[in-house]
Amino acid sequence: MTLRINGEDRAGVQAETVAELVAELGLPAQVILVEHNDVALRRAEWAERLLQEGDRLEMIRIVAGG
């Protein structure tokens, strides 16, 4: 499946849910914010949110600084 992630097309995605996609991409779930098709998601929703061909996701890593 092809998804648009952070403005770039990514083909060959095997994940069926947002939670699986975060794992597939090797992202640290504790510090990632996800928007799926213009809807900001709580981490608890990731496992229930199904992905479909052409979905748009924004994934942002939170970085603490001082």
Image (cartoon, grey):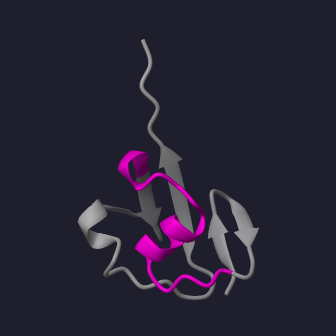
Span colored in magenta: 13-32
Give residue 4's position: percent from left, percent from top. Answer: 65, 70
Name the image quarter holding residue 31: top left
Q: Is residue 5 above or below residue 16?
A: above
Q: Is residue 51 above or below residue 35?
A: below
Instruction: Tell whether position 2 is magenta.
Output: no
**Picture quarter with the N terminus:** bottom right
Give residue 64's position: percent from left, percent from top. Answer: 42, 25
Please state the total of marks drawn on the protein image: 0
Picture residue at 57% right of the left edge, 60% below the top = 26
Give residue 52's position: percent from left, percent from top. Answer: 54, 88
Picture residue at 53% right of the left edge, 55% below the top = 27
Q: Is residue 18 left or right of residue 48?
A: right
Picture residue at 35% right of the left edge, 71% below the top = 46
Q: Is residue 13 left or right of residue 15?
A: right
The residue closer to the viewer here, 49 or 23, is 23
